[in-house]
Every structure is written in C-alpha cells, then in structure tokens.
C-alpha cells in the first residue's frame, strides 16, 4: 500500500481512521488515475488531524474551483455597500451595454444567466490580453435573455467580474483580491498570477492521461503563469489549506462578511438545466454551486446542504454548513470526463465514510 510504506508509529492510528480514503487513493494509484494530490478537511475552522498526512502543502492549478474566489471580491464590495448585485453591469462599464446588454445585472454573471457564455468568436491569440477581451465583450451579442437560461460561463465569469472590480476600484483585480480576501482570511498560497518575487514557488506541473483529449492545456496555463498574464478565469493557484480556510470563513467568520451578505450569497438564486454543462440540473448561488444528485467536475458534494465549486482535474472545494465541514481535494492529472467523475466519486465516497467513523 502507498501509505503503509510511509507510515510511522505516530501516524498508524490516523491511517486506521481514514482507511477508506487511503484505500481509494491506493486504488487510483494502481489504476494510474492519480499522480500528485492533496486533501484537507476542517471542522469548525480547525484541521481534522487524521487527514494531515494527505495534505501535500503544495500549490495546484485549481481552474474553475477558483470561481468563488473571484466572486468573493464582489461579495466584499457588496458588503461594503460599494455595489449591489442588482446593479446593471453597464453602470460601472458603460461600453458594455452595446448590443442589448444594458439589462444584464451583476447577479446574472454570478449565476451564469447573462447570455454571455460562449467564446467561439474570440481569437486564440487574444486570450492573453484582458484589454482585447474587454473590447470583445463590449461587442458581444448575448445568446439568450438575461436571467432566463443557465449557460455555464466558463471564462466570461471571471473576465466580466474582474473588469467590474477594476473599474470600480481603479486597481487591478489581483490587488483588490489580495486586499479584500487574502489578507483578512490569511490566504498565503492563493493568487491569480505569480508575484514578482524570484522565490515564488511554482504550482505542481499539470500532467495529461492518455484518456484526456484536451490539447495543450498544461502548456497554456504554464505559459500564462510564467509570463504573469492575469487571465482571472481559470488561472487561480491555491492549496487545500487555503481553500478549506476560505470555505470555513464563509460559514464561521463573524468579521469578514455580514450575516446579511452570507445569507444572500448562499441561498439558491436560480435552478434548472445548464445548457453548457451536459444538460445537468444545477442550483446556483452567487458564485457558488449547491450539491445535487449529479456529481461532475463542476459539482460539489452530494450532501444536501453543501455548496462550493469544482474545476478540471477533479479539483474541488466545498463546505457543508450543517456539519461545519470544509473539504478540498486537489490533484494534477487530467483525465477524460468519465474517468474524472469516477475518480471524484471514489474519493468523495471514501472521505464521507471516514468522516462517519471519525465523528461516530
């Protein structure tokens, strides 16, 4: 067994307590379906020490699991009465209203219902230039009426919200994210572009399994990172400790967000078929996804009250308020969709069984 070889006398008891998770990881290792990984779990803001041996402390590309981090800046600006979720985007970005986009509200972006979801018309070489992306968004003609249809905003989510933040604050998105989220929550390993420090640690490399048909994503994200291009959407780097700290703060912190804001962002605002996500049924808050029966790379735990967000590679973090648990799973091996779902379901079920054992 992978963990038996690493065990010390002091860790044997913890290994017994999380045997389902360890067995699942060993199974995935033997099947070649996991490489580097990290798992962290907090209960009432404190680490569950039995899982400490699974926390690699490494940073990973977390892809769309970073969407709530983007949304968190908007949450704070709302909490500080600087904006309202019902404000039209064009209130802060006048050029955006072209082509009948004047009725698109900030909450439509946060619930993936703005009608600005597809990027087929954006040229490949424009992806690294946020100014060109902004001009492209200004000229975009929505594919649906705002608020009427859920269509997952894979990259437009971060681009639009990031532009709103920059126009309101006259600072870069990264500066405001650091000020409003990282500092108050003590997130030391989370960022959207590399800092200028030469000592900055690179996240773990992305590897591609033979089943994965996505081309060059490992090279693209490495290039964005090294060249310090702040793509915002999909470019978040973090570790499992920061992710569980973030979700724990949403439900436990008394100073970061007001109760009014917490209740508003964590209620279901829209639900229905997601036309950009295999026609799966979705329940969405403001920048977060609620759990459901369909588990996939953008879903969260199957617990009835959990919310969070996932991304490629089964990178996912979520919280379960009733049990006050915050969970993060990160890894760096790209799989096909089918194998990705299999990997996540195997891990999440094993973790659930071990948590039952720990709390019985």
Image (cartoon, grey):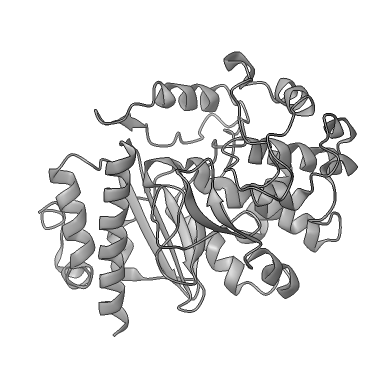
Closer-to-camera residue (336/129): 336
* Residue occupying image coordinates x 50% and y 33%: 199
Left or right of 339? Residue 311 is right
User: Could you tell me residue 208's position as x and y percent?
Assistant: 31, 29
Marker count (numbered): 0
Q: Is residue 161 above or below residue 3?
A: above
Closer-to-camera residue (91/235): 91
Q: Residue furthest bottom?
A: 360
Closer-to-camera residue (251/211): 211
* Residue occupying image coordinates x 57% and y 43%: 152
Left or right of 199? Residue 130 is right
User: Could you tell me residue 259's position as x and y percent?
Assistant: 71, 74
Q: Can residue 189 be seen in this snapshot?
A: no
Left or right of 99? Residue 13 is left
Q: Can residue 297 be seen in this snapshot?
A: yes
* Residue occupying image coordinates x 64% and y 68%: 267
The quarter of the displayed image where residue 249 is located: bottom right
Left or right of 311? Residue 12 is left
User: Could you tell me residue 231's position as x and y percent?
Assistant: 61, 31
The quadrant of the picture occupied by the C terminus is bottom left
User: Could you tell me residue 336's position as x and y percent?
Assistant: 31, 36
The quadrant of the picture occupied by the N terminus is bottom left
Q: Is residue 214 above or below residue 249?
A: above
């Amino acid at each position: 067994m992978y963990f038996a070889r690493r065990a010390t006398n002091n860790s044997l008891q913890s290994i017994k307590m999380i045997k389902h998770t360890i067995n699942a990881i060993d199974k995935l290792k033997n099947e070649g379906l996991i490489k580097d990984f990290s798992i962290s779990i907090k209960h009432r803001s404190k680490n569950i020490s039995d899982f400490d041996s699974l926390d690699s402390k490494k940073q990973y590309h977390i892809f769309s699991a970073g969407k709530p981090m983007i949304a968190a800046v908007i949450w704070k600006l709302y909490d500080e009465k600087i904006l309202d979720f019902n404000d039209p985007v064009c209130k802060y970005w006048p050029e955006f209203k072209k082509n009948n986009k004047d009725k698109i509200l900030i909450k439509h972006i946060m619930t993936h219902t703005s009608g600005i979801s597809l990027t087929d018309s954006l040229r490949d070489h424009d992806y690294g230039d946020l100014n060109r992306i902004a001009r492209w968004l200004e000229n975009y003609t929505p594919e649906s009426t705002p608020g009427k249809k859920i269509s997952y905003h894979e990259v437009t989510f971060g681009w639009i919200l990031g532009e709103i933040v920059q126009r309101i604050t006259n600072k870069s998105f990264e500066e405001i994210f650091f000020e409003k989220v990282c500092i108050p929550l003590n997130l030391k390993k989370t960022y959207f572009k590399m800092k200028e420090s030469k000592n900055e640690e690179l996240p773990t490399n992305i590897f591609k399994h033979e089943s994965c048909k996505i081309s060059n994503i490992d090279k693209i994200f490495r290039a964005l990172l090294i060249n310090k291009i702040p793509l915002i959407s999909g470019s978040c780097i973090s570790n499992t400790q920061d992710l569980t700290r973030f979700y724990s703060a949403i439900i436990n912190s008394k100073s970061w967000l007001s109760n009014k804001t917490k209740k508003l962002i964590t209620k279901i605002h829209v639900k229905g078929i997601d036309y950009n996500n295999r026609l799966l049924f979705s329940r969405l808050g403001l920048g977060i996804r609620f759990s459901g029966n369909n588990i996939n790379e953008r879903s969260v735990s199957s617990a009835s009250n959990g919310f969070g967000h996932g991304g490629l590679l089964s990178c996912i973090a979520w919280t379960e308020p009733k049990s006050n648990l915050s969970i993060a799973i990160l890894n760096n091996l790209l799989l096909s969709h089918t194998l990705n779902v299999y990997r996540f379901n195997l891990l999440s079920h094993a973790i659930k069984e071990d948590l039952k054992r720990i709390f019985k």
